[in-house]
Image (cartoon, rainbow, N blue to C red):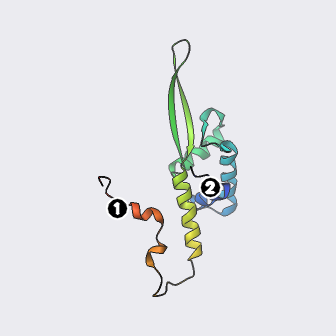
Amino acid sequence: MNIVTVNELSTAIEEKLDIDTVEAKKYANIVMDFFGFEDRIIDNTLEQKDRQLFYMLETQGLLHTQREMITLVDGRQWRIHYWLLTKKTILRYSNNRWISTKHKNRQPSQHDNIYSYLPKDMWMTRKNPAI
């Protein structure tokens, strides 16, 4: 599975929230301090101010939630809420930023392959799921 770095998350936050690099880096560090090397964390570890940041990133598609029901020894049901990194979206926005800065001031020549300027996920937008 892909690993998300602080720099990739920071770039994705900067792109999605349209904020400056310093603030995006601050948010990315807060989020990655919770996740560390894990893909998901338990919601109970968050304080209210951190949870607000997570909700903001969830609305932008960079995080998502999941819940699980478990049965306790005494038979009661217990619901556990998790936060997960949306790695595909984070990496896509991080890579789009890299592509856009790479080709920013360059005009395509007649010998360039126009398809090399399209992001890889663009090819999946018209894919027929029945095939």
x%, y% of residue 103?
Answer: 56, 77
* Residue 10 in which image quadrant: bottom right
Taking 124 as reference, is 23 left or right?
right
- Sequence-wise, the earlier of marks 1 and 2 is 2
Quadrant housing the C terminus: bottom left
Q: Quadrant of residue 16?
A: bottom right
User: Which of pointers 1 and 2 indicates the residue nearer the eye?
Assistant: 1
Write the residue at 62% across / 55% down.
9
Hey, which residue is sitting farthest left in the picture?
130
Residue 47, position in %: x, y? 66, 37
| Residue 45 quadrant | top right
2 in relation to 64, above or below: below
Q: Position of residue 102 (x, y in %)?
A: 59, 74
Relative height, residue 124 to residue 72 (above, below): below
Q: Secondary structure at mark 1?
A: loop
Circle 1: residue type: Arg
Which residue is identified by label 2? 9
Circle 1 residue: 126
